[in-house]
Image: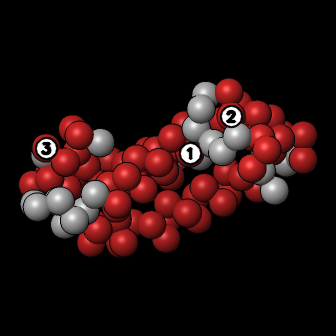
Amino acid sequence: MAFCLDRAEASQEIVQTLTEALTLAETPVPRKVARLFLCSDLLHNSGVPGASSYRLELERALPAIFASVHDSYVGLGSLMGMELVKVRLRQGGCARPAHHSP
């Protein structure tokens, strides 16, 4: 994230690269989730002087990003596959602890 904030003048290209990475069908779901965390961090920190362009660029890209993430999630095809992704995310420290899950 610091890399992106330090290069805020290139926000259009950075968001374009993130969008391409998030919309590739062959990108594994856990990797997509990690990249979504980066998008979230960029949105959260878009109030930092010079970084406001990330909000505008991400607002344009998010519909395509979330459509692709949804397709990937649905494409897992089974409850077992979905649960496996949840377990892998928890093991990587990318999700809420198990006792906070619905």
* Classed neighbour count for the residue bearing mark 1: other residues with Cα under 10 Å, few (<14), some (14–19), many (≥20): some
Amino acid beneath label 2 = Arg
Among the 4 quarters of the image, the one containing residue 93: top right
Among the 4 quarters of the image, the one containing residue 42: bottom left
Residue 57 x %, y %: 28, 66
Q: Tag count in the figure?
A: 3
Q: What residue is shown at x 77% (from left), y 50% (from top)?
A: 101
Inspect this view and state whether residue 26 appears.
no
**Callout in the foreground (2, 1):** 2
Between the residue at mark 1 and the residue at mark 3, the CA separation in whole angstroms equals 23 Å
Circle 2: element type: helix
Q: Quadrant of the N terminus?
A: top left
* Classed neighbour count for the residue bearing mark 2: other residues with Cα under 10 Å, few (<14), some (14–19), many (≥20): some
Amino acid beneath label 1 = Val
Circle 3: element type: helix
Residue 46 x %, y %: 25, 62
Inspect this view and state whether residue 98 appears.
yes
Q: Which residue is mark 1?
A: 33
> Which of the marked residues, 3 or 2, is nearer the chain's N terminus?
3
Looking at the image, residue 46 lies above or below residue 36 = below
- The reply, left or right, for residue 28 in relation to residue 57 is right
Between the residue at mark 3 and the residue at mark 2, the CA separation in whole angstroms equals 30 Å
* Classed neighbour count for the residue bearing mark 3: other residues with Cα under 10 Å, few (<14), some (14–19), many (≥20): few
Amino acid beneath label 3 = Asp
- The reply, left or right, for residue 37 in relation to residue 94 is left
> For the view shown, which residue lies furthest in the front direction?
99
Circle 1: element type: helix
> For the view shown, which residue lies furthest in the top direction?
91
Q: What residue is shown at x 68% (from left), y 34% (from top)?
A: 90
Q: What residue is shown at x 76% (from left), y 34% (from top)?
A: 87
Q: Which residue is mark 2?
A: 90
Q: Which residue is mark 3?
A: 6
